[in-house]
Amino acid sequence: MSDIIVLKVFASEIDAKMAQEALQNSGVKSFVFKDDVGGMEPQLQLTAGVRLLVSDADAERAHQLLES
């Protein structure tokens, strides 16, 4: 079983979701994690960021996909 790592931290949920969609279209499973009190405090995304998580096994491929 591989570990889950933070691939990249984004300033907004929209940017993280766009990256997640690009990864999904290439067959890489990813998750978006944000701590904004269930959407009630979206400004918290600016301080803590929105994290894009992938498995450690997919990290190198995912990083290459986002860079291209």
Image (cartoon, helix red, strand yellow):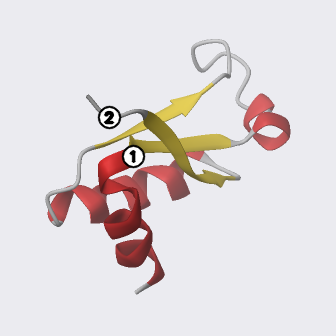
Q: Residues within 10 Å of mark 1 (few under 14, many from 20)?
A: some
Looking at the image, residue 59 sits to the left or right of residue 50; the answer is: left
Q: Nearer the viewer, residue 59 or 33?
A: 59
Pick out the residue farthest to the bottom: 68
Return the disc, 2 or 1, that comes first in the chain's sequence.
Answer: 2
Q: Is residue 67 above or below residue 20?
A: below
In percent of the image, x 74 and y 21: which residue is there?
Answer: 41
Q: Nearer the viewer, residue 27 or 5?
A: 5
Q: Position of residue 20 (x, y in %)?
A: 36, 53
In percent of the image, x 66 and y 12: which residue is there?
Answer: 37
In percent of the image, x 32 and y 34: which residue is there?
Answer: 2
- Quadrant containing the C terminus in the rendered view: bottom left
Q: Secondary structure at mark 2?
A: loop
Number of marks present in the image shown: 2
Specify the amino acid type for callout 2: Ser
Label at residue 56: 1
Q: Quadrant of residue 31?
A: top left
Q: Residues within 10 Å of mark 2 (few under 14, many from 20)?
A: few
Q: Nearer the viewer, residue 26 or 47?
A: 26
Label at residue 68: none
Q: Is residue 6 above or below residue 41?
A: below
Q: Is residue 30 above or below residue 59?
A: above
Looking at the image, residue 47 sits to the left or right of residue 21; the answer is: right
In percent of the image, x 39 and y 46: which residue is there?
Answer: 56
**Residue that badge 2 annotates:** 2
Mark 2 in CB contact with mark 1 (< 8 angstroms) = yes
